[in-house]
Amino acid sequence: MNQPLSLAGTPAASPLGYYSWAFGQAARDPFYIMVVIYIFFPYFSSVVVGDPVRGQALIGYINASVGFVLAATILFLGAIADTVGRRKPWILATYGTIALGGFLLWWVKPGGAGLSLYSSVGLIFIIMVAFAYAEVFHNAMLPSVTPAEKAGEVSGLAFALGNFGAVSMMVLVLFAFALPGVQDWPFLPEQPLFGIDHSANEHDRIVGPIAGIWLVLFILPVLLFTPDGQSSGVTWRQAARAGMGEVVTTLRQLIKHYSNIAIYLLARMLFNDGMVGVLIFGGVYAAGNFGWETITLLIFGLTTSVSAMIGAYLGGRLDDRLGSMRTLKVSIIMSAIILVVLTSITPATLFFVVPVSVEPVWSFPYFNTVAELAYLGTNQIFALFFVTGLSASRTLMAKLSPPAMATQFFGLYGLSGSITAFLAPLLVAVVTDITQSQRFGFASLVLLILAGGLMLGWVREEQATRAAD
């Protein structure tokens, strides 16, 4: 029986190899979901900084700075990695940096009791840069290890595993650290485990070390079982020189011979920045708007991750039925509409003008007002379409790329989600600063989502052929 070919046109890895690749995202996504989206960034904004508006703006500027660094370096690092031939050393270095940074987040305390505010900002900056590098190097392995006919399945599995990991971690933090001592439910420990002190915000800070341990454990299948590329034998200095030339050549060919893919990558830069921005700032916005604290944000993240798991499965089926382009367009349009709805919700109003009661509507201690329930429910719908869009955009890239250059173009695909990563955070930061409004800052992301969606109108769903040398 012939060994199936990968998207790169080379023999694919064994099932153990390509299914193990999915665990790289299972290691990475829970860290992002717990630290960036739902727990640590909202804690940093509201408690460490102490002012939700200033905190949201500061997080925006951190992410914008990260984006500028990535724009200046990541193309060259990717080309150097391709020239060297092996990606596992890069994965080990970047994932290790993230894990170490996660442990150090334990010392980010209010009032400068641990790390100073400037040191905390620097630590978060390093973690975010390493995270973006890790994502590119890991994703670049997909075309060469996965059978072409299973690329969508393995990609979807990676997203599902990532969200399943986040759900598992949130359940652990919620029932072991956040709820004990706050609720006297019979199935909870009387006090947080390991002596975690709520008054010192240790239930917020513990997510960094836990996410770091999780990341180390779940990157092991990639390092142990997923085959790496062959070493080219060139020195790092030779690789750096060749990488510089490769970047220039690739960009010239992209504009001259692959304009359809270039337009798609540019469109993705915009809509992806906007949609990811909704995730980054959704928890920060809710913490400032509704006063949500750790337990509420954990439940919020838990339900949203479950919705994302469902979206990963349904999105794959929708992709097979409608095609990647149509599925992606539906996801973008719905994401823009849902963002507007999210920003229309305040503690006392829905849809900007409809007044609602601020009194509790049920006895459950969380999400007990009409507005909070509306925000929670609306965000679940966003999660469905967001993950559907992620899956469809990756599948569409596979359909557009020349088979013989799949690895190179998937590298560019990963880079397109990083080199303009400053746009959404910078837009939110500037609009929040100018208007002194979390709502307007958060709502500004709709501009990026719609701009990227409109650009898709110029993209043809057809596979490119390799340009003549």
Image: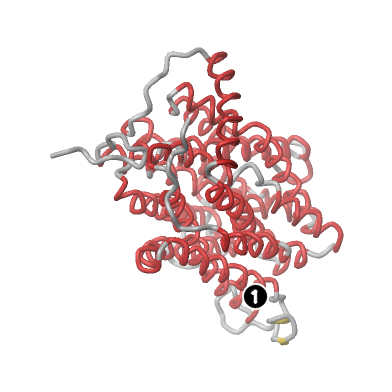
| Quarter of the image that includes the N terminus | top left
Residue drawn at x 58%, y 45% is 416
Q: Position of residue 255 (x, y in %)?
A: 60, 42
Comparing 122 with 276, the one in front is: 276
Against 381, residue 69 (above or below) is above
For residue 33, say whether it is visible.
yes
Q: Residue furthest left?
A: 1
Q: Position of residue 47 (x, y in %)?
A: 73, 53
Residue drawn at x 45%, y 28% is 87
Relative to 381, is 320 on the left or the right?
left
Hey, which quadrant is residue 246 in on the image? top right
Comparing 50 with 430, the one in front is: 430
Q: Which residue is mark 1?
A: 341
Against 441, residue 273 (above or below) is above
Relative to 237, is 69 on the left or the right?
right
For residue 38, say whether it is visible.
no
Residue drawn at x 44%, y 67% is 186
Comparing 234 with 168, the one in front is: 234
Three-letter amino acid code at the position of disc 1: Val
Q: Position of residue 447 (x, y in %)?
A: 70, 63
Badge 1, how many Cα within 10 Å: few under 14, some, many 20+? some
Comparing 368 with 448, the one in front is: 448
Q: Position of residue 126 (x, y in %)?
A: 65, 34
Count of marks, rendered view: 1
- Which SS class for mark 1? helix
Q: Residue furthest front?
A: 468
Q: How is the image coloured?
A: secondary structure
Against 40, residue 133 (above or below) is above
Relative to 38, is 189 on the left or the right?
left
